[in-house]
Amino acid sequence: MTPRRVVADELELGAGLEVLVAAALEGVAAGEHLEVQVGSPGIAHELAAWTRLAGHELVDQAASGGRGAQRVTIRRAGTRRVLGDEAPPRAEPLGADGRLGLDEVRAATGPAPAHAPPAGGLVPLGAIAEPGGVGGTPYHWALSERDRLWARELALLAEIAAREQWDATEDVPWEAAAGLPDDVERAVSQVMTYIAQNEYAAFYVPARFLPQVNPQYAEVLLWLASHVHDEARHLEVFTKRAVAGGVRSHALASTELSLHTLLEEHDFSNAALLLNVLGEGTFLDLLRFVERHAPDAATATAARLAHRDERRHVHFGIAHVRRRIAGDPDAAAALVAAAEARAAKLTSLSGISPLLSEALTLMSARSRQPAEVSEAAAAVRALLVTMHDNRQRRLRAAGFDPATARYLSELHTPNLM
Amino acid sequence: MTKLPVLVGCVAYHPRIVTIWEGFLPWFERAGTPTDYVLYSNYERLVDALLAGEVDIAWNTNTAYVAAEERIGGDAQVLAMRDVDADFATVIVTRRGEAFGHPGELAGTRLALGSRDSGHAAILPLHYLAQEGLDAASECELVRFDTDLGKHGDTGDSELHVLRALREGRADAGAIGDATWALLRTTAPQETDGLEIAWRSPTYYHCNFTALPSFEGGRAWAQTLLTMSYDDPSVRTEMDLEGVKRWLRADKSGYADLTAAMLAQGHLP
């Protein structure tokens, strides 16, 4: 068999010679020869040394042609540069229509495994793991069961989240926050402070699951990362609105108590029910109310932008819980038990904080005329009814029967989140 | 009854030596050849330890091996070496465009050498240049960098000094190991900037595992070592650090030049 041949001419070691030769050796079988034509004895000498260091064998080094040119013959060694399975042959390209969704990548690289190796490394979809990386200190991914994490349209949700990012510095007409009467600004600030306080919980809950998810479930990671990023922006925008009018309000102890129980939930699906379906679901109605009744465009815009994100979070929660209930006959009972356990810790909360409901009312009232205050108070009472109705609707969509949906909605924290 | 481990002596020329042997030990244990290691600060102490029976096997430079062989009386056991230790060579480097046609042309120039106890960067260059008819010690101005004496050039530090002297015009030619050159070219190209290889010496053997003739476990230990595979993820990192892809059976055929050179240059009693 004629040896493969590479012409390197004046290319030197360190300037690309070793790259050219290593690439050519990839196409040479172990034990076969590669001839390299180089421009000078000095280059031939350094190639000879590189050959030995790379584990191959120098077979011959001889003058070849004029002006100092040399031919170096290398026998390829059998050692493999990378351990692990061989890469498969090249497949059809992806993204032919100009967009490449993660679902297409998943379809090309194989389905998400039902059980991912809990000690597996950081291996991207489609990549072949080289063994030996971390040796004695492997990973221990706590969340390595697909069905405990998955939801329909998971990848799509993460992609929409990336597309719908917004900017809490520029996308809100902050100048509109100035000039409200003192009592209205105090009411707005209290509502905004309350929402920002809640957004912290919505931030920490997915953030704590994120580093526990097995790298094999890239869709879950992308989703949780987008969730965390959304909440970071929410706590940013509501914090900004809370202080933008020059007023400072209270982070309420009753809210703190309620949120703390949410942070104590360590099961992924329980958290999806309590945070995404019940908490953020209830907030959808709250944010819509704020948008509609806000006395200024800055507040209304902040609520509208956050509402758009929360819809995705709620959609994920419903899809995940529905999948859990459909796939596991014991799941529904376990989820109900989690809601009951949380409610048991919140017996000291007897209703929505008066400070919050009063602030919502004063924020919404167009004046301090009794008729208008009465109208605003009625709107807040109607909001609580709407929240209860919509919670039941979402719980039924998540797979609970109507009686259980009603029971869970009634168990839900008076803090709303 | 548990087997007593084979005790290998090494020189701690870099902290990675600990990483390498701590990685190798479990592999030897699994291979059924329990092994332990002891570190010495220099090769003279290691050879003393071998002669005194403190260690079963010494992981020697070529210079340390020849010194040990001389004291043992020619009966040392040479057990194994790395693939890179076969066909080792010294290169003479010059500034680009100043390469010579024949080593004889170096007469009257300044020749930089690495540590005087380094086989590849000092002892063998003088020997091979003499074979080419150049008595460098008298015909050249020798610019020596004895920066890591006792380590026999293992640290590579004196060779960096040789290259720096060339770049800065403090020497006209310099001797280093060809492996050092290839490694610097691909990982620290600034060290070789503006320089080129002018000449390459005949090849010789470098390091080996040496044992006293009385040590009976040597062959079996080497047999085990030869089965260590670069395709085994449990030792690949350590083999990379040691600069080996395959362990080879060693013999004494690659040390004749160095033995002659050390005798001629007064490195042996």
Image (cartoon, coloured by chain):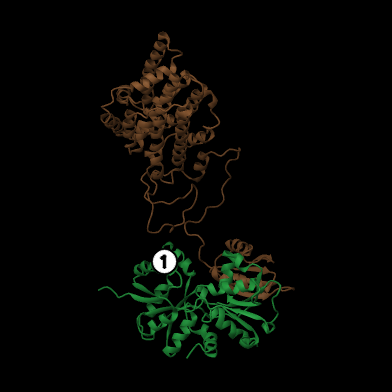
Chain colours: A brown, B green
Rendering coords of residue A181 (x, y %) = 47, 18
Q: On screen, A335 above or below A57?
A: above
Task: Say which residue appears at 49% left-offset and 23% top-offset.
Answer: A300
> On the image, which quarter does residue A227 sit in?
top left
Residue extending furthest toward the top: A371
Residue in the foreground of this view, choosing between A130 and A168: A168
- Quadrant where the C terminus of chain A sits is top left
Residue at image coords 42%, 82%: B47
Indicate the quadrant containing the N terminus of chain A: top left, top right, bottom left or bottom right: bottom right
User: Circle 1 sits on which residue?
Assistant: B19
What percent of the width, then of the height, locates residue A205?
Answer: 38, 37
Res. A287 visible in picture = yes
Question: Mark 1 belongs to which amino acid?
Answer: Thr
Q: Nearer the viewer, residue A161 or B251?
A: A161
The image quadrant that residue B200 belongs to is bottom right
Q: Is residue B44 left or right of residue A354?
A: right
- Tell me if residue B102 comes above or below residue A146 in the rendering: below
